[in-house]
Amino acid sequence: MSASAAARPGLPARTARRFRTVLLLWAAILAAADLTVKALAEAQLSTGTTTDLGPINVRLLYNRGVAFSFGADLAPWIVIAATGLIIVILTWYTVSTAPSVTGLSRAGAALLLGGAAGNFIDRLDGQGVVDYLHSGWFPTFNLADVFVTTGVALLVLGAMDSPRTGA
């Protein structure tokens, strides 16, 4: 029995495997959705057009760094290697703990991994990550960034959620 299955006594190995598979499947679906929206944004906004949607504008920007353009001056291979390593560690952790955490935490993990994978794949061409949502008061961001931020929040909330005991 693995260490994560031991955290929930009586959890069948098949169920643990299903939790892991569903987590990775949802992460892949979310990454694909993010990459599709980025491709559409590039196709529609590559001429420099901006669409005003009230509190948010849609315009094309490439972020060569990571969060808030941190590390934008580094060589692209360094940013790719560092983010790749972080994603490998996050994937290992979330997959290994999936059977022993709450459903809220698993949902957060899927969002986090999906967003991280979407941005990582987008970064591989060396041009940076496609960002397209601009508020004027916050750095320009994309759907993957929303996934990552929401995922982290759900992971934290799920970790704070104590296991329920039956009566």
Image (cartoon, rainbow, N blue to C red):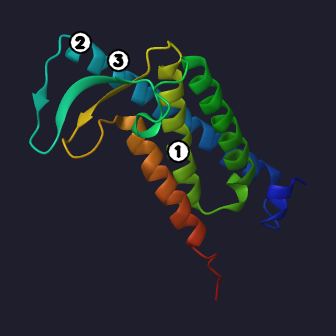
SS of the residue under disc 2: loop
**Which of the 4 image quarters holds residue 33?**
top left
Q: Is residue 46 visible?
A: yes
Q: In screen coordinates, is 62 left or right of 135?
A: right
**Earlier-in-chain disc, 3 versus 1:** 3
**Earlier-in-chain disc, 1 versus 2:** 2
Residue 163 drawn above or below residue 23: below
The quarter of the rendered structure image containing the N terminus is bottom right
Residue 104 drawn above or below residue 28: below
- Farthest residue, direction bottom: 167
The kind of residue on which mark 3 rests is Ala
The kind of residue on which mark 2 rests is Ser
Residue at 53 percent across and 27 percent down: it is: 120
Disc 2 from disc 3: Cα separation: 10 Å
Rate crowding at label 2 as few (under 14), some (14 to 19) or many (20 or more) other CA atoms within 10 Å. Answer: few
**Foreground tag (1 vs 2):** 2
Residue at label 3?
Answer: 39
* Label 2–label 3 contact, CB within 8 A: no
Measuring from the top left, give residue 80's x and y in whole percent: 59, 24
Rate crowding at label 3 as few (under 14), some (14 to 19) or many (20 or more) other CA atoms within 10 Å. Answer: some
Residue 21 drawn above or below residue 163: above
The quarter of the rendered structure image containing the C terminus is bottom right
Residue at 72 percent across and 54 percent down: it is: 97
**Which of the 4 image quarters holds residue 131?**
top left
Residue 46 - label: 2
**Earlier-in-chain disc, 2 versus 3:** 3
Residue at 21 percent across and 26 percent down: it is: 59
The kind of residue on which mark 1 rests is Leu
Residue at label 1?
Answer: 112
Q: In screen coordinates, is 115 left or right of 95?
A: left
Q: Is residue 18 visible?
A: no
SS of the residue under disc 3: helix
